[in-house]
């Protein structure tokens, strides 16, 4: 350190305080990085690596970025998981004695950024803090950019405690995670964080979770009314997580978190449980393969006009409600906006003009917003009175309460418009943002700058008249400033009050007291303008920042209005209906449709299907049929319809009765986790195990092709055992949709209470099959695997050989069972009463009529089939 230059000593003193960050060190108009930071940043951002003398023999590696465009570079670093500390000059270099003072004004991390360029407007950016205690997990989740903070406590003694914690982490999907060392005692949670979450994780020291310190931080941040539910619950682990999160955020933001004053202390029992596998398999907010929004339920429903509405809608799809009253309130609001088209459209037009009030309020309260953002706030607020007035036409309880909580913020708009000009510059340090006429001194200074030449010309003319020297002129240079120049021929006319400044070969240059004062005014005016404007702007920003909670409450009301309008628009456009919500266990859907598949089909018709599930005779549906026929689509659509209903949306059906479901679990598709050493079958079994351990009688389970990753008999045994366990009310008894290619499973109908067989109907003509997409009662008469392979483009030779092998295997199986050659065991049929015409031919005719789906026949096919049935009926008679 002794050999370093003073500036590099200062750099290292700061760097030692922030060793785990990339330090951006302000030098003039650049942020510079040195040594290992410089090497890292030059590689990550493809910047030129240079060097700088630092007082030692070797030059310090260095790279830099302009301070006025640094945000983009910082965003790229943060997005790649780096922490960035910004070290600013904290005094005016012109006034500094010696080295300019510098200090870190902010640390940017993946979970704490508030800049728009670094955030996705459609989703929250969460930081999570987990405290693993002896008896419970405390979980605190905060989005600093919007000011929301959620807190919960989960028992660590329950059988499924780790699953409950991973479910919550999976639901919020934070970009940054803080935790205590005890979390390593829970391997499933750690494996989930390492394998399933794209998150920057950091273990905090035990002191960060000290109960007394955390309690004090909590009470300093929130008022007693906010903390009452938490105090009543006595959730000590939650308090530790909350306190550690607050301490970390204050240290990073370098402020008292003025935008976080409300705390949502919730129980996971308030919302439908959706584990990570279910969110992924149902493609709620991102697709399985590309992980994008298009092709998801959110994509279909998101007709929101504001950033706040987009985030709220996403949250509601990830957190469907369990409170019947709240669900019905949401449905009533949607119903009203569906019926009042003009009101919905007028609200939508106005909402489209409202900026992101939540994030604007945060940047204003943190002192990072510029004049343009204050103007954006004013413009957004200007539409609130009209939105508020339109909501007065509503009648539903939810829309009325929303209107009451919406503050029009007209005083804030007036104040901004009074002070900030119409088109302020991006920078707040160079002036040009304060409206003319607002401040007398500022107007005078601007007048001096704008009319500088005129003032000089006036002085020159006055001095010419005063002295009688017609060739007297006033000039300027950087060394002497303003001066009066008089040629030597007029030296005897120079007044006594002129002060000689410079002698030249043919003239003399003078200054006067008036000219010195004018020079001081003109040269200092621009600097004074910039300083005065910034002072006025800072005062306004602080004034509005003090109103952050008013803005946040209004932002929430705007988001609520936006979400209800969006859901109503989707319902009106897509022919969705209001579900009849019940407290019982019955799910009855008529003409249900898959919302996403229907949307992607465009003008092509979607074949609707009915569903009946309850806790009695229809608790379990075994669904058979060929691949690609629509089994997975059907099961997913049932799950999505239930989820949409409990989230507050209308549903794609002609009629729907939905009994509340406490959780949805899905096991769909084949995937492996090679990094964790798990095969496809191991992943499948792990997910099945988690479902059976966490589901209840009020759950909805979707099983798709259980047991296909192992041998036939092992897989069939596992599939049957899983279905028996799920259907047995003494052990689980959940509502279950079970798709399988094991046709032997259909034998369970009539032997296992609540089990019913269904199949996806197909039409076969020779070697060709047509998928009819219709679900009907009974088991399928085959898997049609070879036919599907042919459709997929398998070479004809392979298809032909597959048929030969299949025939050999079927014959071998029949021989082993001592069955007549060429006859196969008929799949179990429905236990429903059978009618008879009194003969084998009559039974055959009746079976054919029972399986006939007239909705799928063309007029010509229908006439042909009717003629065929009439001829058969003559033979029966």
Image: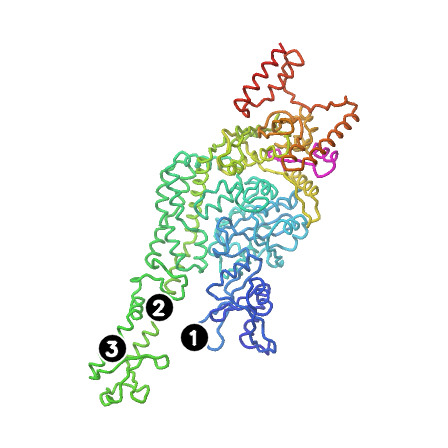
Q: Earlier in the sequence, mark 2 or mark 3?
A: 3
Quarter of the C terminus within the rendering: top right
Q: Which residues are magenta?
A: 695-721
Quadrant of the image occupied by residue 209: bottom right
- The image's colour scheme reads rainbow
Q: Can residue 513 be seen from the camera position used here? A: yes
Numbered circle sitting on residue 529: 2
Quadrant of the image occupied by residue 838: top right
Q: Residue furthest top?
A: 877
Which residue lies under the disc numbered 1? 94
Which SS class for mark 2? Answer: helix
Residue 563 pos. (x, y %)? 45, 42
**Who is closer to the viewer here, 28 or 672?**
672
Mark 2 vs mark 1, CA separation in Å: 17 Å
Which of the two discs, 2 and 3, sits closer to the camera? 3
Residue 776 vertical position relative to residue 146 in the rendered view, above or below:
above
Q: Earlier in the sequence, mark 1 or mark 3?
A: 1
Q: Residue at x 54, y 59 (%)?
A: 76
Q: Residue at x 62, y 46 (%)?
A: 166
Which residue lies under the disc numbered 3? 459
Q: Earlier in the sequence, mark 2 or mark 1?
A: 1
Quarter of the N terminus within the rendering: bottom right
Residue 199 vertical position relative to residue 44 in the rendered view, above or below:
above
């Amino acid at each position: 350190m002794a050999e370093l230059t003073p500036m590099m000593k200062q750099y290292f003193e700061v760097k030692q305080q922030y060793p785990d960050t990339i330090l951006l060190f302000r030098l003039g108009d650049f942020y510079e990085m040195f040594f290992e930071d410089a090497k890292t940043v030059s590689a990550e951002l493809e910047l030129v690596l240079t060097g700088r003398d630092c007082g030692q023999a070797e030059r310090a590696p260095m790279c830099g970025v302009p301070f006025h465009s640094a945000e983009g570079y910082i965003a790229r670093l943060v997005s790649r998981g780096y922490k960035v500390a910004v070290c600013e000059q904290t005094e005016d270099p012109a006034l500094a004695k010696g080295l300019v003072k510098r200090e870190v004004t902010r640390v940017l991390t993946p979970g704490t950024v508030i800049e728009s360029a670094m955030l996705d407007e459609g989703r929250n950016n969460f930081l999570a803090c987990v405290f693993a205690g002896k008896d419970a997990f405390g979980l605190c989740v905060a989005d600093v950019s919007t000011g929301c903070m959620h807190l919960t406590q989960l028992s660590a003694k329950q059988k499924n405690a780790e699953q409950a914690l991973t479910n919550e982490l999976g639901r919020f999907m934070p970009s940054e995670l803080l935790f205590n060392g005890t979390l390593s005692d829970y391997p499933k949670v750690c494996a989930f964080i390492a394998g399933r979450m794209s998150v920057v994780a950091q273990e905090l020291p035990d002191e960060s979770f000290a109960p007394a310190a955390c309690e004090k931080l909590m009470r300093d941040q929130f008022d007693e009314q906010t903390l009452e539910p938490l105090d009543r619950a006595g959730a000590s682990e939650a308090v530790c997580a909350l306190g550690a999160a607050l301490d970390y955020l204050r240290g990073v933001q370098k402020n008292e978190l003025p935008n976080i004053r409300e705390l949502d202390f919730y129980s996971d029992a308030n919302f439908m449980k959706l584990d990570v596998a279910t969110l992924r398999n149902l493609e709620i907010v991102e697709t399985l393969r590309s992980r994008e929004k298009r092709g998801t339920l959110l994509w279909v429903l998101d007709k929101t006009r504001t950033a706040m509405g987009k985030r709220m809608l996403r949250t509601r799809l990830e957190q469907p409600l369990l409170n019947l009253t709240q669900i019905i309130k949401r449905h009533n609001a949607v119903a009203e906006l569906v019926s009042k088209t003009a009101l919905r459209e007028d609200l939508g037009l106005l909402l489209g003009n409202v900026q992101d009030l939540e994030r604007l309020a945060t940047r204003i309260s943190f002192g990072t917003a510029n004049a343009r953002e204050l103007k954006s706030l004013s413009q957004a607020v200007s539409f609130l009175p009209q939105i508020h007035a339109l909501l007065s036409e509503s009648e539903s309880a939810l829309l009325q309460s929303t209107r009451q909580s919406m503050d029009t913020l007209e005083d804030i708009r007036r104040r901004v418009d009074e002070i900030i000009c119409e088109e302020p510059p991006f920078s707040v340090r160079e002036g040009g943002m304060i409206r003319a006429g607002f401040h007398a001194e500022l107007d005078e200074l601007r007048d001096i700058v704008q009319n500088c030449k005129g003032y000089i010309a006036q002085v020159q003319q006055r001095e010419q008249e005063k002295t009688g020297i017609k060739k007297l002129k006033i000039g300027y240079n950087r060394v002497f400033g303003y001066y009066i120049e008089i040629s030597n021929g007029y030296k005897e006319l120079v007044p006594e009050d002129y002060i000689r400044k410079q002698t030249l070969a043919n003239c003399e240059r003078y200054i006067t007291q008036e000219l010195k004062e004018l020079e001081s005014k003109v040269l200092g005016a621009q600097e004074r303008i910039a300083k005065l404007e910034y002072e006025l702007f800072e005062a306004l920003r602080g004034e509005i920042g003090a109103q952050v909670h008013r803005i946040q409450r209004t932002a929430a009301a705007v988001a609520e209005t936006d979400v209800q309008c969006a859901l109503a628009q989707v319902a009106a456009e897509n022919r969705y209906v209001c579900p009849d919500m019940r407290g019982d266990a019955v799910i009855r859907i008529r003409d249900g449709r898959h919302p996403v598949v229907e949307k992607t089909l465009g003008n092509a018709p979607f074949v609707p299907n009915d569903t009946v599930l309850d806790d009695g005779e229809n608790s379990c549906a075994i669904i058979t049929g060929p691949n690609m026929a629509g089994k997975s689509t059907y099961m997913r659509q049932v799950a999505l319809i239930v989820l949409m209903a409990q989230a507050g949306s209308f549903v794609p059906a002609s009629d729907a009765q939905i009994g509340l479901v406490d959780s949805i679990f899905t096991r769909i598709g084949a995937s492996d986790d090679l990094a964790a050493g798990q095969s496809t079958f191991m992943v499948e079994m792990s997910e099945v195990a988690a479902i059976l351990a966490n589901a209840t009688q009020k759950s909805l389970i979707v099983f798709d092709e259980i047991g296909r990753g192992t041998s036939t008999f092992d897989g069939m045994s596992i599939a049957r055992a899983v279905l028996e366990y799920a259907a047995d009310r003494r052990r689980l008894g959940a509502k279950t949709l079970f798709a399988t290619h094991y046709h032997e499973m259909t034998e369970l109908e009539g032997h296992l209470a609540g089990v019913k067989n269904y199949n996806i109907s197909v039409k076969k003509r020779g070697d060709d099959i047509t998928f009819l997409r219709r679900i009907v009662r009974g088991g399928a008469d085959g898997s049609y695997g070879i036919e599907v392979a042919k459709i997929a483009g398998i070479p004809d030779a392979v298809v032909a050989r597959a048929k030969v092998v299949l025939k050999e295997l079927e014959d071998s199986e029949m021989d082993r069972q001592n069955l007549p050659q060429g006859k196969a065991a008929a799949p179990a049929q429905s236990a429903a009463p059978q009618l008879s015409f009194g003969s084998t031919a009559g039974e055959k005719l009746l079976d054919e009529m029972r399986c006939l789906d007239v909705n799928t026949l063309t007029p010509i096919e229908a006439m042909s089939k009717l003629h065929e049935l009439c001829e058969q009926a003559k033979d029966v008679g």
